[in-house]
């Protein structure tokens, strides 16, 4: 009975926590929408395209709200979602939809009032719209160029060229028992020498989070553990445990080596994302370099005056 009540209490607590997390997410999304929402001038392009009868894409694009007759389309919601920081952008749409729609409605209301006050006719507004348009065109050109050049064939060619240079790594699988004092660790070593099961002792006595797995740390390679632990673990033979306690910043460890293996280079599918990012960055940098080389560029001081000649101070002589 007590265990059932405890389970029920934990269940209620978990449900309350889940509600609080959802509320926090909604609040954070609202703030993010206010910070990252597109300016009214940029959003208005959808409305113009709709009046002309030109669909933005082939996908269904329903009207999701109207504000004084002005329509907000499903595509507007998708565009606004794309403006969110990644940690919010990847949330399920059922969590994002209402906060995004509320922000789009707010933007429609405020932008309509701004137009009524003719704020869209000011030079400052037009300059901001021009700057936003330039950034959007920059993004569109980069996206188009990358999409055209990062093909399946190019990705596979890059993989075949680089996969041979990916050396295999030695990996080990180890268990450990973490305790606070050397005396505790020494006692555990004696128990292991007497035939006690390592996983059972880890579950009973370890203070580390891996105790629920019998101390199992899965496979790891060099550089992933603190140096004292790594040195001791990699020095063991398969099935062997440390005969003296190993001190680290976390406490005292008793370590057992379960297995050794050579890791395989990642497959093409595992490397696809990384290769795509590398190629995209290289293509974007090359495009900027090529176009910059063809451009006529003049630089001026912050006040618009001719650039001043800046003399480089010679380095002091070496002593």
Image (cartoon, rainbow, N blue to C red):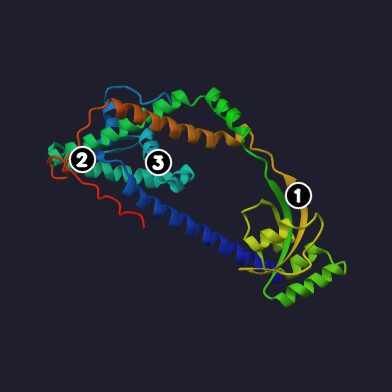
The residue sitting at 61% across, 54% down in the picture is 223
Instruction: Pinpoint residue 178: horizontal percent, then vertical percent.
Output: 69, 68
Image label count: 3
Which quarter of the figure has residue 281? top left
Q: Closer to the N terminus: mark 3 or mark 1?
A: 3
Disc number placed over residue 260 in the picture, else none: 1
Q: Residue furthest front?
A: 319
Residue on which disc 3 sits? 81
* Residue 186 position (above or below residue 90): below
The residue sitting at 77% across, 74% down in the picture is 186
* Residue 194 position (above or below residue 47): below
The residue sitting at 54% across, 36% down in the picture is 273
Q: Would you call the spot at circle 1 few (<14 residues within 10 Å), some (14-19), or many (20 or more)?
A: some
Compare residues 22 and 41 and report the one nearer the observer.
Answer: 41
Q: Would you call the spot at circle 2 few (<14 residues within 10 Å), some (14-19), or many (20 or more)?
A: some
Instruction: Single out the mark in the foreground, 3 or 1.
Output: 1
The residue sitting at 30% across, 41% down in the picture is 38
- Disc 1 is placed on an element classified as strand
Specify the quadrant that holds the C terminus. Answer: bottom left
Disc number placed over residue 159 in the picture, else none: none
Would you say the residues marked 3 and 1 are in contact, meaning their CB atoms lie under 8 Å apart? no
Compare residues 171 and 179 and report the one nearer the observer.
Answer: 171
Q: Closer to the N terminus: mark 1 or mark 2?
A: 2
Instruction: Single out the mark in the foreground, 2 or 3.
Output: 3
- Disc 2 is placed on an element classified as helix
- Disc 3 is placed on an element classified as helix
Q: CA distance from mark 3 to mark 1?
A: 46 Å
Compare residues 211 and 265 and report the one nearer the observer.
Answer: 265
Residue on which disc 2 sits? 112
Instruction: Pinpoint residue 179: horizontal percent, then vertical percent.
Output: 69, 71
Q: Residue furthest bottom?
A: 183
């Amino acid at each position: 009975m007590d265990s059932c009540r405890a389970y029920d209490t934990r269940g209620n607590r978990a449900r309350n926590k889940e509600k609080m997390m959802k509320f926090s997410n909604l609040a954070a999304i609202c703030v993010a929408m206010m910070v990252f929402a597109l300016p009214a001038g940029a959003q208005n392009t959808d409305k113009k395209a709709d009046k002309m009868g030109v669909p933005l894409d082939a996908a269904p694009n329903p009207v999701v709200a109207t504000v004084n007759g002005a329509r907000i389309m499903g595509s507007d919601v998708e565009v606004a979602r794309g403006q969110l920081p990644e940690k919010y952008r990847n949330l399920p749409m059922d969590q994002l939809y209402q906060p995004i729609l509320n922000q789009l409605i707010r933007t429609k209301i405020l932008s309509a009032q701004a137009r009524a006050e003719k704020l869209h006719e000011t030079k400052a507004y037009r300059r901001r719209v021009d700057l936003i348009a330039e950034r959007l065109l920059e993004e569109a050109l980069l996206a188009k160029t990358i999409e055209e050049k990062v093909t399946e064939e190019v990705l596979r060619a890059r993989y075949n060229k680089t996969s041979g240079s990916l050396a295999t790594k030695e990996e080990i699988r180890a268990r450990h028992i973490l305790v606070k004092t050397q005396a505790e660790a020494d006692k555990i070593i004696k128990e292991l020498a007497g035939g006690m099961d390592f996983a059972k002792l880890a579950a009973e006595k370890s203070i580390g989070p891996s105790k629920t797995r019998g101390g199992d740390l899965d496979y790891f390679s060099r550089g992933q553990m603190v140096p004292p632990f790594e040195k001791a673990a990699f020095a063991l033979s398969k099935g062997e445990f440390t005969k003296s306690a190993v001190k680290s910043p976390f406490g005292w460890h008793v370590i057992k080596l379960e297995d050794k293996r050579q890791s395989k280079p990642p497959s093409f599918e595992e490397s696809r994302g990384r290769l795509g990012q590398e190629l995209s960055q290289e293509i974007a940098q090359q495009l900027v370099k090529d176009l910059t080389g063809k451009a006529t560029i003049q630089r001026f001081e912050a006040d618009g005056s001719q650039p001043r000649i800046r003399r480089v101070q010679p380095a002091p002589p070496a002593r």
